[in-house]
Every structure is written in C-alpha cells, then in structure tokens.
Amino acid sequence: MCTIAINGIIPISVKSDIFAQGSMAAVSLGSGDDDMIHRHTWLFWLIGVASVCGLMKSVMATNPESFSEIRVTDLEQRMLRMESLLSSDGCGSASGNPTCDSSAGPSIYAGYKFLFIKPQMKESFEATLINTAVGQMSLVPLDYSFNLTPSIWAGFRADDTVGARVTYWDFDQNGNNQQFVSDGVILPGATATTVIYPASIIAPAPGDILQTQNSLTVRTIDAEGTLDLRIRETALTLGGGLRFATTDQHMQAAATRGGVPIGLLQWSREFQGFGPTVSATATHPLWAGLSAVGNFRGSLLYGQKDLNRTVIGDVTPPAAAAPPVIRLKDADEVVAAGDMGIGLRYTVDVTQQAQMFVQGTLEGQLWTEAGSPTLTFLGFQGLGLSLGFDY
C-alpha cells in the first residue's frame, strides 16, 4: 500500500495491487462539498501515484535485492559527504589547521620565527647639518637596515582547549655609522635633549669630521595561559599572562679636527619592566592545507628607566646650557607595546597525531616612550618566516 498527502492536508491511500489487476482504486477523501470540486485533480494524482507504486511492487517482486543495494549506496554517499564536511570545517586532513587534534589528550607544540625587520623611530635624528649661507638646519634621521632577528615559542595543551605558552624575542642591532665633513659653509653637528636639557656639538671648520653611531636592543619574554576556541571554520587561540621586556638605546657622536677630538656627545636610555599581556591568533582554512592566519598582542609594561647624557665641547647657548653630565636613575616609567601580523600558513600531516607547518607573515610593532634621542615612538616593520610543529 502507498500513502500520500495532497497539499499536506488530505491523506489518500492507494492499493497498488488493484491497479496492477487493471481495476480502479477506491478513493477515500475528506468530507464536505468542497472536496467534490477537485475530484478530477485528485484523480490524476491517484493514477500517477498508483502507477509508481505498482511499478515499485513489480520491481521488488522480480529483484528484491536491488532496493537493499540502493539503500547501502545512499548510506555510503552520506558518509562521504560527512567526511567532506569534516575536512572543510578545519579539522580534517585537508584543513591546514594545526590546532585540530584527533586525540583529546595532552599535546605539545613549538616553533621558530625568522624576523626580517627594521626599526623605525618617529621624528628621531642623529645629526644636524647647518647651512650658514641660507640659515637652514637639516635633520639627519637614524639609519637602520633590515636585519634577521630570532623568535621562538613553545607550549602545551592539557586538553583540546586549555594550555600554556612561552615566547621569546631578541632584537640586537647597530645602526649604520654615518660621517659628515664640514666645508666651512655646511656645518655638521649632533644634538640630544635629555628630559628638557639640550646639548650640542659641531664640526665648524673646513675639514672637520663628525661621526655618529647608534644601537638598539629589545628583548621580550611572554608567559601566558591559552584557550583554543572555534567559530565555524575559524580556529582561535586566545592568550593572557605577563610580559617582561628590556630596551637599550645608545647614541654617540664625535667631532674631530686632524684626528683630535674637539667634541663628544653620548646619550643612552635603558628600560626594563613587566606587565599584563593579551594575545589572539586566528587561523582560517582556505584550500588543501593552506590557511589564512592573523595574530595580535598588546602589552602594558611598568618598570624603571635610566637616562644618561655626557657632552664635551657643548656649543649650546649659555642660557640653556646644563652641566656636562646628566643622569636620571631608576625613574618610574610605563611603556605600551603592540604587535600584529597577517599571512599564510601551509600545514602537512606527518602522522595521525603530528603536524608541521611553514608560515609567512607581514609583521609590525609599535612601542611608546621609545625612540632616540627624544621621547617619540619606536616601530618595527618587516617579514616573518616561521617553522613549527604540533604533536
């Protein structure tokens, strides 16, 4: 017997064996005069359904195994579609997402990043060029090149969500040394302002030489707890903990005449502190192991700084001149630091439990209360190449 409902309201039962014998089926419809109006429409439906039911009965009578095969084939197709969905949502072999783990037990991960970056300092300069003919001073900015710096991280997950991570970064670079020769009209010099006290040296006579050099060191250690989440196909790793950081900036300028010093200016700022840090990393699968990745970190650092300035041959006007040596020791300071990166990651499955990945990112950082020699901003920009594993 086949049973259907026309318009989702009126149930109609048709005995297929009656049609198989060439007889007209008895139709039982709902009561009321309105049902008689659509008699012809229902009749066409009944004829079509009865024909299908009769055909199905005939096929089943001749080959009952065929329907079982059809049901098995349908189940296989459903299973294949489910496997495809698992792969597309970021937790299959083609996901390219290292945060997915087939096991629910503890896991470890680590990585190494090559950062090819360059520091940039807002409105900071290391030399001046005074054109006495036109009364103009030109400021020469600090000169740094792109350089490779290392960053390393390692962590573990106690289960699929909660874990801990430690990250270390070390930047230590000397700026490009510069040399300027005076011609008696354009006079090279150097200036540094410590707090509110300026100091300047100059190479005034033709043939006098001014040489400058500077260096910058920044080190950070982040220790944080992590939480892994998933929003549809995107995997999120959130972190929160503490950062310890040190910055060390030095600048030196020397004026000489015939190899004999006629002026010397040294300036330095050192800071160390720690404070809260938060981070977020998002990974979204794209295609066949390739994923888009983005990361952000923000920190507030509280600590102490030291300022030192020494000058010999100061040419600052007497009204603004200060003693040759100025020091500010153990002064309270707060520094904000933020960094972010975006890029692509390619992941391969080494075993059922282990994955390896390579990642390329565009990186940027911004630090407040830094920059040499005035209090401006210190930034970093460049590229990152990361190698890591998740087991």
Image (cartoon, grey):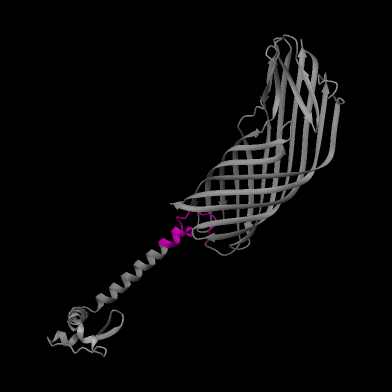
Q: Residue 323's quadrant in the figure? A: top right
Where does the magenta region start and end? 84-101
Q: Horizontal placement of 48 versus 76: left or right?
A: left
Asked if residue 349 can be seen in this view, the reply is no
Report the label total: 0
* On-image quarter of the C terminus: bottom right
* On-image quarter of the N terminus: bottom left
Q: Residue furthest right?
A: 323
Q: Is residue 369 above or below residue 30?
A: above
Q: In this view of the protein, which residue sits in the foreground, 311 or 11? A: 11
Q: In this view of the protein, which residue sits in the foreground, 195 or 210? A: 195
> Which residue lies at the image location 70% right of the left edge and 39% below the top edge?
218
Q: Is residue 364 magenta?
A: no
Asked if residue 91 can be seen in this view, the reply is yes
Q: Is residue 161 above or below residue 319?
A: below
The image position of residue 55, as x and y in percent, is 18, 78
The image position of residue 331, as x and y in percent, is 83, 41
The image position of residue 12, as x and y in percent, is 25, 85
The image position of residue 177, as x and y in percent, is 68, 23
Q: In this view of the protein, which residue sits in the foreground, 135 or 207? A: 135
Q: Is residue 245 above or below residue 127?
A: below
Q: Is residue 55 above or below residue 319?
A: below
Q: Residue 164's quadrant in the figure? A: bottom right
Q: Is residue 97 magenta?
A: yes
Q: Residue furthest left?
A: 22
Q: Horizontal placement of 66 versus 127: left or right?
A: left
